[in-house]
Amino acid sequence: MTKTDVLVIGAGPAGLSAAAYAARAGYDVIAIDQLSPGGQLLLIDEIENYPGLALTNGYKLAEDMEKQATSFGAKIEFSALIGIKKEGEGRFIAQTDSGEIEAKAVIIATGADHRHLGAKGEEENQGRGVSYCATCDGPFFKNKDVIVVGGGDTALTDAIYLAKITRSVTIVHRREEFRAQKALQYKLNGYDNIATKLGHNVVEIISDGRKVTGAKLENGEILNADAVFIFVGIVPNTAPFKSFVALDRNGFIITDGKMETDVKGVFAAGDVRTTPFRQVTTATSDGAIAAHSADEYISNL
């Protein structure tokens, strides 16, 4: 069995930030992830809203975060979590596909995946005009035509955001009415460049082989556009923790402001937790707070 002070589960922005802060504080840190470090960062072609960096790409930022964490002594291992349990204060046992890890504190940073439409052409056009984040990618489509798929609060909020910087926004929603709060629906009326297509499904993302050129509806109608923004929900990666920590009704981990869960010594950071805003900057902030809180917990054992 491998022993460590802090076990970080997940090596996206939140996990790498937590690992860096905890290691810099002098703790032995192991961060595990079944994929390459970086998480959702690896899906972002260009990032221009990370403080202090005028323009970078997700792969480069992820690489820099990993190097920083390991430079402080954090170890990053490629393992998948199978299960985890608490065997007393300051003693957690994590079962991975590479063996058991014992830790004094645990930081969960497994993130969340964007729910996909399952439309033809969706997967291959990610980063070429298919996006799941308006604030991340919207500015790249200034004065162009875009499609927003979805009918909830996020879809309408981001459609309004996009309407301010693009030429036109067409919202496609599978139901005959939006699910978003009425206040957001009323706001749509203030934008002449927002059109709606209710009661329709996008069945295909069309491209010219290099970039998105539009979308096809189930009735055969083609909507020309330079980008398709998909907001049909996100799925938190919390399957291994359902009987370990408290989750909200959508499956996200509930924390307080110190990133502490209902289990003492277990913290959560980033997209996996209940939070009103999910960005790279907020994830790294969560990770720093979680590491600080883990430090306080271990110091008081």
Image: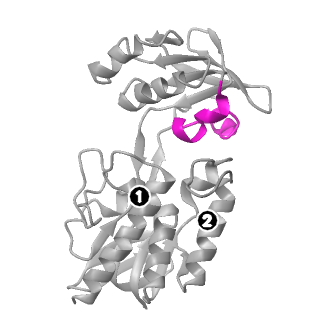
Which x, y percent locates residue 72? 55, 84
Q: Secondary structure at mark 1?
A: helix
Q: Is residue 130 magenta?
A: yes
Q: CA distance from mark 1 to mark 2?
A: 17 Å
Residue 119 in sight here: no
Say which residue appears at 49% left-offset and 18% top-offset: 171
Give coordinates of residue 21: x percent, y percent: 45, 77
Q: Is residue 101 above or below residue 171?
A: below
Quarter of the image where the C terminus is located: bottom left
Where the N terminus falls, by quadrant? bottom left
Q: Give the crowd class for mark 2: few <14, some 14-19, many >=20 residues within 10 Å.
A: some
The answer to whether residue 18 is magenta is no
Q: Amino acid at mark 2?
A: Ser
Residue density around tag 1, few if under 14, some if 14–19, many if 20 or more, within 10 Å: many
Dot in front, 1 or 2: 1
Q: Which residues are magenta?
A: 121-142
Residue 242 appears in view? yes
* Badge number at residue 124: none
Q: Residue at x 43, y 48 (%)?
A: 278
User: With 51 as the anchor, is 253 left or right in this view?
Assistant: left
Which mark is on residue 270? Answer: 1
Q: Specify the amino acid type for callout 1.
A: Gly
Name, please, the residue furthest toward the right. Answer: 209
Location of residue 92 with respect to 202 vertically, above or below: below
Q: Secondary structure at mark 2?
A: loop
Contact? badges 1 and 2 (CB < 8 Å): no
- Residue in the picture at 46% in, 24% down: 160
Tell me how many marks there are: 2
Residue 36 is marked as: 2
Q: Position of residue 10 (x, y in %)?
A: 47, 66
Looking at the image, residue 101 sits to the left or right of residue 222; the answer is left
Task: Indicate which disc, 1 or 2, sits on the residue closer to the N terminus.
Answer: 2
